[in-house]
Image: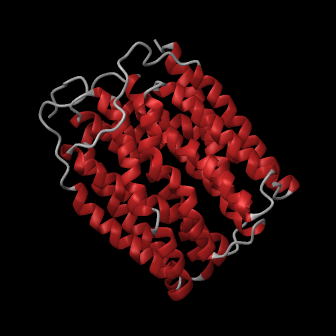
């Protein structure tokens, strides 16, 4: 029987997915069409946008002394709602753009720190991947609704970014209300404020690699389509819609695959697929005829979005090696801070490389990082007796 908390958490995730999908699908067009940023300026924008991720260890640590994870999720969604509405109505210049990007980003990074722990608390022992996959499927379902609405509105009324972000803000607010009503974690001992342990170093390394991958593709994957090929916001929304639709099925399935094959295999294969995506972005325009190259880039964009689901493997891996359940949320926060410390400047470097040498070299660099990540992931080992409940692992 599905518990009340599980139903509310899944519904909150649907609304969160709608807000996040609208924001991500429209951001590059918004920056190009409304604020007229070039590739180098787009790269520089990643510094303030990802600053909350760098500081999340301290933000989450402070919040954990007062709030449990579900309350932090509610606060995160309120910040996201404020950021979205601000971008839509209160950001006429670059200064206000940065302010509301940072507000949105702060909410976004807080939810990333706590959504995994909330899902783990609602999971059965040994089926953590399955439960987190279900949450990923719910998030994709929300993305389908949100991005589908943006696609239709863009076709009917044009690129009305204020309307798009109003819908995103309303969705985030609804998610916040639902998260605030969760009782999961009530009465448990609070998580620790800060955690850094050498035994978690591989988790930190994998988090850093994921951060680098995320930065390059969120900043420059869609930018190739928008700037090089002139793809419209409605087409980007359609691609995001396709990826989200696939994710409704694939995310729960990938969660089952994580439980079946283990994090080592899944994350290593993910890096190899990422390498193929990088090579597609870098060379499809040179090696394939124009229309075929564009469709290859569309496929690479969709595949990359689907593969983002595998980030839950990091959380399930952590749940199997922690000494204490209270380590999970602050360790995830530490991982986010470390990956942003490594990755915050990479988009700036990538923007410079794009302008100086061409976009291909950005993705050649990303491919080299993916290849390094493959060898890092091969080092994953799960102790025979591990996990937050001490289950015996094969």
Which picture quadrant has residue 159? Answer: bottom right
User: For this view, does 211 lie left or right of residue 375?
Assistant: right
Q: What colour scheme governs how the chains and residues are painted in the rendered image of this protein?
A: secondary structure
Which residue is found at the position 35% from the left and 56% from the top? 208
User: For this view, does 320 lie left or right of residue 193?
Assistant: left
Can residue 309 be seen from the camera position used here? yes
Q: Vertical placement of 325 versus 217: above or below?
A: above
Can residue 237 be seen from the camera position used here? no
* Front residue of 209 and 292: 209
Which residue is found at the position 13% from the left and 30% from the top? 385
Which picture quadrant has residue 181? Answer: top right
Which residue is found at the position 63% from the left and 47% from the top? 103
* Front residue of 258 and 61: 61
Q: Vertical placement of 191 versus 172: above or below?
A: above
Question: In the image, residue 272 lies at what x, y percent?
Answer: 33, 63
Question: In the image, residue 264 lies at what x, y percent?
Answer: 24, 49
* Placement of the C terminus among the 4 image quadrants: top left
Question: In the image, residue 280 lies at what x, y percent?
Answer: 46, 73
Which residue is found at the position 58% from the left and 42% from the top? 107
Question: In the image, residue 100 lies at what x, y percent?
Answer: 68, 51
User: For this view, does 277 lie left or right of residue 256?
Assistant: right
Q: Vertical placement of 91 versus 362: above or below?
A: above
Q: Vertical placement of 80 versus 48: above or below?
A: above
User: For this view, does 381 lie left or right of residue 84?
Assistant: left
Q: Residue furthest toward the left?
A: 384
Number of on-image labels = 0
Q: Residue furthest toward the right?
A: 157
* Front residue of 251 and 385: 385
Which picture quadrant has residue 7? Answer: top right
């Amino acid at each position: 029987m599905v518990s009340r908390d599980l139903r509310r958490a899944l519904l909150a995730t649907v609304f969160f997915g709608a807000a996040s999908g609208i924001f991500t699908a429209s951001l590059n067009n918004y920056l190009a069409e409304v604020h007229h940023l070039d590739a180098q300026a787009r790269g520089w924008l990643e510094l303030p946008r990802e600053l909350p991720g760098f500081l999340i260890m301290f933000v989450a640590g402070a919040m954990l002394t007062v709030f449990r994870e579900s309350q932090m999720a509610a606060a995160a969604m309120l910040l996201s709602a404020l950021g979205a509405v601000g971008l839509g109505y209160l950001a006429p210049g670059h200064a206000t753009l940065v302010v509301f990007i940072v507000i949105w980003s702060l909410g976004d990074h807080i939810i990333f720190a706590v959504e995994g722990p909330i899902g783990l608390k609602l999971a059965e022992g040994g089926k953590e991947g399955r439960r987190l996959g279900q949450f990923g499927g719910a998030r994709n379902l929300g993305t389908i609704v949100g991005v589908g609405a943006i696609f239709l509105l863009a076709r009917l009324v044009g690129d009305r970014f204020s309307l798009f972000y109003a819908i995103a803000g309303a969705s985030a607010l609804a998610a916040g209300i639902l998260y605030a009503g969760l009782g999961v974690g009530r009465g448990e001992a609070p998580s620790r404020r800060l955690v850094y342990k050498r035994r978690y170093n591989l988790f930190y390394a994998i988090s850093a690699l994921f951060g680098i991958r995320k930065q390059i593709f969120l900043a420059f994957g869609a930018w190739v389509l928008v700037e090089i090929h002139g793809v419209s916001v409605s087409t980007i929304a359609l691609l995001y819609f396709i990826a989200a639709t696939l994710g409704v099925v694939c995310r729960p399935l990938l969660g089952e695959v994580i439980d079946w094959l283990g994090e080592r295999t899944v994350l290593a294969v993910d890096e190899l697929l990422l390498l193929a995506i990088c090579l597609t972005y870098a060379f499809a325009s040179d090696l394939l005829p124009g229309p075929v190259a564009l469709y290859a880039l569309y496929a690479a964009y969709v595949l990359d979005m689907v593969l983002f689901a595998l980030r839950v493997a990091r959380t399930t891996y952590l749940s199997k090696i922690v000494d204490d359940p209270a380590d999970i949320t602050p360790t995830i926060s530490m991982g986010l801070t470390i990956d942003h410390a490594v990755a915050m400047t990479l988009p700036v470097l990538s923007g410079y490389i794009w302008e100086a040498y061409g976009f291909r070299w950005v993705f050649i660099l990303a491919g080299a990082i993916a290849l390094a990540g493959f060898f890092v992931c091969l080092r994953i080992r799960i102790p025979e007796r591990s996990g937050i409940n001490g289950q015996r692992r094969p």
